[in-house]
Image: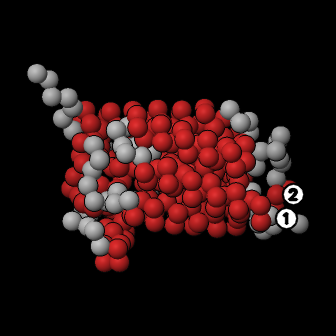
Amino acid sequence: MALEDQVPVVAGVHMIALYICAVIAVYAALRVITERNSMRKLPFLNVVSFAVTGIIALLLPHPLTIAAAAAYFVGSTLESNAIASTWAGGLKRP
Amino acid sequence: MLDEPIRILIAALICWFNFMIIDLIFKLPERGGVSGATAIAQEVEKGGGKLNGGYMMGNIVSSPDASAGTLLAGCGVYCAGLPGGLFAALLVYIGNRICYDPGYAGTTGCITATFIVYGAVQSGWFAASDFIAGMVIAILTIQGLSSVHASRLIAWLWKIRCRLLRGCT
């Protein structure tokens, strides 16, 4: 008996893929909390963004979800970019 | 169709090679695209990693690259088929432009991933959701486990890429 027959499929959502994304998101969030160095937190934060983007798409299978997922992902990337650049010296004020 | 966990692992391997090959071709490990990426690379190097690997990790953090393209292509094909993947490529390009990146790596990665995912779904061996979870696993191996080991791995691959394709400084 295939494994997917035993796992509940809610509205066509693939639960194993969803669980994997959720577990990775929680793991990466814990790594963000435990990492001391601020710059080295950002790659873990990036993993959280990937996982949450995947969860958004898996939970809402609708064409407009692509726009939502991309908007969330680009927004979080831009935030990381801004945090890293500010930490690295930021804007040169006149 | 195989069991879902096995499909997800195979999809993770495919995604890993897709984004790594395209990022290496587009020279992401060569230098930091923005000052934040350079700063992340320097911190990774201070922690015992390699600078070139750190540059690529910093660039992945600072701008949507081929890994983001692969993930959004998976989401696009999952939600709306082939047009969804190509629409995701457009969104990745816009996202790249917002983040001060030329956008070649992200857009190319998204388009190749769209065709890979769509082909895999059409073949009947995979579901598009496998590639979404697979890409999350693939990015976990690079960004989420150990910055030291990941940066060394990327630096080693970068050396191989320089030997094969040249054009590195």
**From where the camera sits, is residue A51 visible?**
no
Whether residue A29 sits left or right of residue A92 in the image: it is: right
At a point 59% along the width and 66% down the height, the residue shown is B14
At a point 45% along the width and 45% down the height, the residue shown is B64
The numbered mark at residue A5 is: 2
Q: Secondary structure at mark 1?
A: loop
At a point 35% along the width and 78% down the height, the residue shown is B164
Whether residue A65 sits left or right of residue A49 in the image: it is: right
- Are the residues tagged 2 and 1 within 8 Å (C-beta)? yes
Q: Secondary structure at mark 2?
A: helix
| Rendering quarter of residue A71 | top right
At a point 73% along the width and 48% down the height, the residue shown is B81
The chain holding disc 1 is A
* Marks 2 & 1 on one chain: yes
Whether residue A8 sits left or right of residue A43 in the image: it is: right
Instruction: Pinpoint residue B36: horizontal percent, then vertical percent.
Output: 27, 42
The amino acid marked with disc number 1 is Ala
Q: What is the distance, in whole Å, between disc 2 and disc 1 at their CAs? A: 6 Å
Whether residue A73 sits left or right of residue A84 in the image: it is: right
What residue did someone put label 1 on?
Answer: A2
Instruction: Pinpoint residue B45: horizontal percent, then vertical percent.
Output: 23, 58
Question: Which residue is nearer to you in this view: B56 or B4?
Answer: B56
Q: In this figure, what is the number of numbered marks?
A: 2
